[in-house]
Image: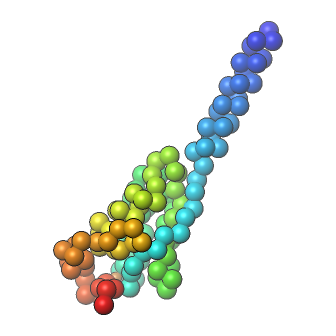
Amino acid sequence: MKTKVLILMAAVLLVGMSAFAAGKKTEKINVAGKCGMCETRIEKTASAIDGVTKADYDLKANKLSVTFDDKKTSVDAIEKALAGVGHDTDKYKADDAVYNKLPGCCHYRK
Ligand SMILES: [Cu+2]
């Protein structure tokens, strides 16, 4: 009887701990962007990543606030995806070929 209670307690503790570890994280990422189209593209790209639950781009500050499950994705993966659609981040630079294909209003590089 005592063992059963102990096992149950251990199980509850384990479930509780794993739920905590899978906690959501909110990070701010520097992302280059210039107009409303950039904002839409950045938010759409980040939101499409598995594990991302919220993405809000501040065009004036050039910062993306992103909420995600750190077991499913990471800041690194998100930055990579953004560079992949033409937006420079601190860590990853978009390929010139991708950047040049962006609409003229989106050309944030001088
Ligand atoms: Cu734009």
Tell me if residue 67 can be seen: yes
Residue 64 placement (x, y as % from top left): 49, 72
Work out whether residue 88 or residue 55 is closer to the camera in this orientation and state it.
Answer: 88
Does residue 69 lie above or below 107 as drawn? above
Does residue 21 lie above or below 68 as drawn? above
- Quadrant for ligand 1 reads bottom left
User: From this viewpoint, which residue is outermost toward the front?
Assistant: 91
The C terminus: image quadrant: bottom left
What residue is shown at x 55% (from left), y 64% (from top)? 27
Give the left or right position of residue 103, taking residue 30 as reference: left
Work out whether residue 48 or residue 107 is closer to the camera in this orientation and state it.
Answer: 107
The N terminus: image quadrant: top right
Residue 29 placement (x, y as % from top left): 48, 70
Residue 87 placement (x, y as % from top left): 34, 74
Does residue 99 lie above or below 19 as drawn? below
What residue is shown at x 68% (from left), y 25% (from top)? 11
Tell me if residue 44 can be seen: no
Q: Quadrant of residue 92?
A: bottom left
Q: Quadrant of residue 6?
A: top right
